[in-house]
Image (cartoon, rainbow, N blue to C red):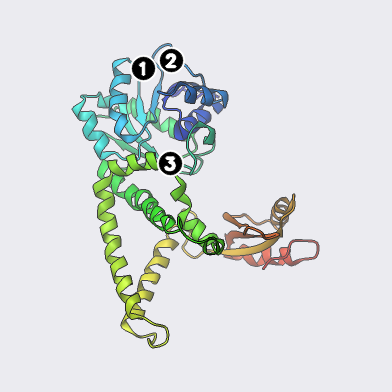
Amino acid sequence: MRHTMLQSAVVIGAGLIGTSIAMSLSARGVTVYLTDREPMAALTAAALGAGRAEEPPGPVDLAIIAVPPRDVAATLAEAQRLGMARAYTDVASVKTQTFNALEKLSCDLRTYLGGHPMAGRERSGPLAARADLFEGRVWALVPTDETSEETWHTVRTLVDLCGASPLVMAPRGHDRAVALVSHTPHLVASLMAARLEHATESEVSMAGPGVRDATRIAAGDPRLWGEILAANAHTVADILSELALDLNDVIDSLRELTVMDKAEDDHDTKALIGLLDRGCAGQARLSHKRGAPLGSYVTVSVLVGDQPGELARLFTDVGAAGVNIEDVFIDHAPGQVTGLVEMLVTAEAAEKLTRRLRAPSTIMAR
């Protein structure tokens, strides 16, 4: 069913994000056109059901510019020169630099509303796209002082159709936020993963879910991430400087600390535990559903066999217990015939779920 504010769109850039947006809009009845400087990318996206790999025959309701940050301004200027759409948005992860470039190119800011969906994958390109990529995710909206009401409504419709939650931000506030929760973590993950490049096979074989979680995002496209980090370089550098201060303090404490001759009330021990406490406090702000109080969820762990149907059986038992899973993690160590499934549930549901899974004919909970 088409929405009255958004019946047609063109996606400029058929990569992971652009194609995922196109898939989501097409699934909801919007007529979507796809363009890309690599024609095969647009053709691939079209073959996946994302839309038509062709230029729109006339002005569409919305143009979504899904190109790297450094190319947004030039792409918008050209699209506006061609009269491609009545409203324009982008998905770039950096806004201050983009806004400065838009002003230099004298773009029409009345028809533009900056956007940035906080979703992605380690894989890139149209083949990695998913229509549900933005479901439940934050979609930052960064208006200019001139953004028109019609443009606002059109871009808000885009966000709604993609199932995301809008969050209005100023350019500098947005860039500081993404540097803190996305750009700097990616660099830190890459730094940690780089330590593994020349590790021995026996060292790598010791890796568990912790190091895999900590380094997962390091698998992202290095060229794309290089462009993103360059566009937000100063803000990321500021956060890395803050991190470096803590890191130097930890290094100093560890150099002085030995388990055998340091008491728990030793200054270096307290400093180390203090940082770990801060880490727990920060992580707790991320590990819960929005609106739920901190500490309201607990983990129920289950060992399952490595055979077809075991996960389906587990989730059937969870459903029979009337329990809603807030999040799930699966750790399957290489060479093992079992996997560990960790389910995040409410504290009230944990005991009921554990009883259910320990009952005869069900999978045993740890």
Residue extending furthest toward the top: 57
Q: Nearer the viewer, mark 3 or mark 1?
A: 3
**Image check: 84 left or right of 137?**
left
Q: Is residue 208 above or below residue 184?
A: below
**Image check: 315 left or right of 50?**
right
Which residue is under mark 1? 84
Q: Quadrant of residue 244?
A: bottom left
Q: How many numbered marks does the figure carry?
A: 3
Disc 1 residue type (three-letter): Met
Disc 2 residue type (three-letter): Pro
What residue is shown at x 32% (from left), y 49% (from top)? 179
Mark 2 and mark 3 residues within 8 Å of each other at the beta carbon: no
Quarter of the picture holding the N terminus: top right
Q: Is residue 20 above or below residue 84?
A: below
> Front-most of 140 and 201?
201
* Disc on the earlier residue, 2 or 3: 2
Q: Is residue 191 above or below residue 82?
A: below
Task: In the rendered structure, find residue 56 and report the number of the disc placed on it.
Answer: 2
Q: Nearer the viewer, mark 2 or mark 3?
A: 3
Where's residue 292, x and y in %?
Answer: 49, 58
Quarter of the picture holding the C terminus: bottom right
Q: Inspect this view and state whether residue 288 appears.
A: no
Which residue is under mark 3? 221
What residue is shown at x 27% (from left), y 34% (from top)? 98
Where's residue 284, x and y in %?
Answer: 44, 62
Disc 3 residue type (three-letter): Asp
Where's residue 90, x and y in %?
Answer: 36, 31
Mark 1 and mark 2 residues within 8 Å of each other at the beta carbon: yes
Q: Give how far apart the Cα atoms at labels 2 and 3 are.
A: 30 Å
What residue is shown at x 44% (from left), y 44% (from top)? 220
| Dot 3 alpha-carbon crowd within 10 angstroms: few under 14, some 14 to 19, many 20 or more | some
Find numbered disc 2 in the image and state the secondary structure of the residue it sits on: loop
